[in-house]
Image (cartoon, grey):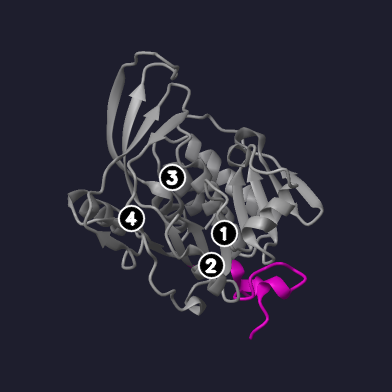
Amino acid sequence: MNQSWLDRKNPLPSFYDISIASLLMANILLIANLNCDRILQLDKPLQTGGRFHYQDGGQRLGGGGANTGLGLVWAHHRVALVSQVGRDKIGDWLLAEASTQGIDCHLIQRHDEASNEMLLVMTPDGERTIIRPQRPIFELPAPPVWSQWDAVYFNSSAEGVVSWAKTALNHSLVFAQLAKDDRLRPCHILIASKTDMAERSDLTPWKYGLSIAGDSLKYFIVTDGGDGAILYSGNDSTHVAAMTSNVVDTTGAGDAYASGLIHGMTTGLTIIDAMKEGAQWAAFAVATQSSIPGETLKAYLELNA
């Protein structure tokens, strides 16, 4: 087996020569949801027993697959998505929108149930509450040939995620988002929000990360919105500040952070600089009234190409 990036003293992917890393784009596989979001803009913050007026913001492309994938496409990576959508008009619309935006959708499966909308209830301060229907069970097929993929990102509750991740670890740089429960997420880099971590475990953050990601874990990142993020690695921890931004819509901020982090790590940045890149992408995302990254991120990437 070839020496992997994890075996090197300098933790950079072995599939890049550092001198030309910035000129090469990565092949990135995302296992994440593709959603049709319906925006309901409320006139005041939510409270128990309240009555609210809303404006219907219409449909828009969303889900971790789109929110994470589009920024990476704009950064000129090749991005393929593993997900499932219904065999209906909304499913057709989702595939058409994602494909038009440049995401490779040939690995997306179709199911026979309806592709119901995700309701995103937005308050004037930019916070959102998500209401979604129960998803049909999504079973991953046999894993792909991992040598074709430089990086893999798992943000899905699909059946088979653990076995896919385990087979990818020796071939690709594996990222994972902490699940809403304590299910395993074998990976090299685990990402979680402070909110998701609340009251999870009495273990230290690093030991908890190891309990989820296994011995392959190199970095555990816990984000905390405007307070930045903390990087855990063994007994060490490092705080990385957030980027200042005018918050308009927080939807997709975590996805944008993951996207910027993946971009940074696959173009030769250190983990700290990759986290700063993730913070920058998240700042652009919260300043945009959409689920997917906005035009400011696209302009930033074009300026820094």
Q: Which residues are magenta?
A: 1-27
Mark 3 is surrounded, within 10 Å at the Cα level, by few (under 14), some (14 to 19) or many (20 or more) other residues, namely: many
Q: Which mark is first along the chain, 2 or 1?
A: 2
- Specify the amino acid type for callout 2: Ala
Residue matched to label 2: 165
Please, what is the dominant secondary structure of the magenta stretch?
loop
* Cα distance in 3D space between marks 3 and 2: 27 Å
> Where does the image place residue 92, in percent across and percent down from the top left?
21, 55
Residue that label 3 marks: 293
Image quadrant in which the N terminus is located: bottom right
Q: Which of marks 3 and 4 precedes in the sequence?
A: 4
Above or below, 194 relative to 274: above
- Residue 243 within the magenta-colored segment of the rendering: no
Kind of residue indicated by mark 3: Pro
How far is mark 4 from mark 3, CA to CA? 12 Å
Q: Nearer the viewer, mark 3 or mark 2?
A: 2
Whichever of callouts 3 and 2 sits on the residue coming sooner in the sequence is 2
Q: Quadrant of residue 240?
A: top right
Gap between marks 3 and 1 measured at Cα: 26 Å
Q: CA distance from mark 1 to mark 2?
A: 7 Å
The answer to whether the residues at label 1 and label 2 have Cβ atoms under 8 Å apart is yes
Q: Residues within 10 Å of mark 1 (few under 14, many from 20)?
A: many
Query: Which of 93/235 is in front?
Result: 235
Instruction: Looking at the image, tell me whether mark 2 or mark 4 is earlier in sequence order.
Output: 4
**Residue 106 located left or right of residue 179:** left
Kindly tell me whether residue 26 is visible in this rendering: no
Q: Which residue is mark 1?
A: 185
N-term-proximal mark, 4 vs 1: 4
**Label 4 belongs to which residue?**
101
**Residue 8 belongs to the span the image colors magenta:** yes
Q: Amino acid at mark 4?
A: Gln
SS assignment at label 2: helix
